Amino acid sequence: LLILALTTTFASFDLLMSLDPHWYSTMFGFYYGTGALLAAFAAITLVIGMLQALGYLTRSVTVEHFHDLGKWLFAFVFFWGYIAFSQYMLIWYSNIPEESIWYSRRGANTGHGFVSGWSWVSLALLFGQLLIPFAGLMSKHMKRNYRVLMSWAAWVLVFHWLDMFWLVMPEMDFDPATSISRVHLGVVEILCLIGIGGVFLATFMKLLEKNALRPIKDPRLIESLAFQQPA
């Protein structure tokens, strides 16, 4: 876990924060890592739900396990929002040009004349990745209905992709005179998503085929199969 935290943090610096060499944030590693964990729990929920729909793990994974996955999903939706707000609030409050221009490019600026297409993307992330799933996942009944939980997991993954798009693409077509960047979604971006996503899914399915769906050598397997939510 320590190695994962360090490598994820440094990867976010090298691959994403370096797109603007003048901008820096000590919270960016937490922001990216929290989003990655949120997407991971959403993907786990979707995969297990699909496996059960195909007749696998029907007795191994119960409604109690889905309830727990729903708790993790809800927790990281909230934690992602907390980190995102904290980073924005500190940069907005200090108002240092080298820091605030990063948010100006993404439309998250309260100044006159800075509204752009990215402003609507920022609002979509506020509602789509925080407020709406926060309200939707709050209910116990939502977490214990795996079909509904799968829908929320798919929702979270779509907006996580939008979050990555929001982090990367404003650095393109940027006008230094106005500090405004144009929303750019073309064929290349769509093909990259299909291509990289296809390679990932093919690799995942190949590994899934070779390995047991249950961790049969785990010494706590019996205990985990009989898992019950506390009253």
Image (cartoon, rainbow, N blue to C red):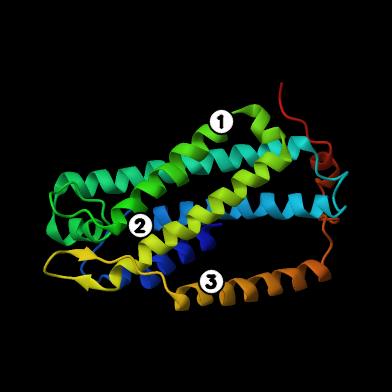
Give the image quarter of residue 148: top right
Q: Quadrant of the C terminus?
A: top right
Contact flag, marks 1 and 2 (Cβ < 8 Å) = no
Judge depth for marks 1 and 2 and give the one in front: 1
Of the two numbered discs 3 and 1 on the same chain, state the one appearing first in sequence: 1
Residue at the (48%, 66%) spot, across then down: 7
Q: Mark on residue 138?
A: 1
Separation of disc 3 and disc 1 at Cα?
31 Å
Q: Secondary structure at mark 3?
A: helix
Q: Amino acid at mark 2?
A: Phe
How packed mark 2 is, by other alpha carbons closer than 10 Å (few <14, some 14-19, many 20 or more), is some
Please give the residue where the numbered disc 3 appears in the rendered image.
193
Q: Amino acid at mark 3?
A: Leu
How packed mark 1 is, by other alpha carbons closer than 10 Å (few <14, some 14-19, many 20 or more), is some
View extreme (top): residue = 231
Q: Quadrant of the N terminus?
A: bottom right
Q: Amino acid at mark 1?
A: Met
Decide if residue 24 is on the left or right side of residue 192. left
Give the image quarter of residue 67: top right
Image coordinates for residue 201, horizontal then vertical, percent? 67, 70
Image coordinates for residue 39, horizontal then vertical, percent? 55, 54
Front residue of this view, candidates 143 and 30:
143
Of the two numbered discs 1 and 2 on the same chain, state the one appearing first in sequence: 2
Look at the picture and state if 32 lies above or below 175: above
Front residue of this view, candidates 194 and 13:
194
Decide if residue 19 is on the left or right side of residue 157. left
Q: Secondary structure at mark 1?
A: loop
Judge depth for marks 2 and 3 and give the one in front: 3
Judge depth for marks 3 and 1 and give the one in front: 3
Decide if residue 116 is on the left or right side of residue 70. left
Please give the residue where the numbered disc 2 appears in the rendered image.
28
How packed mark 3 is, by other alpha carbons closer than 10 Å (few <14, some 14-19, many 20 or more), is few
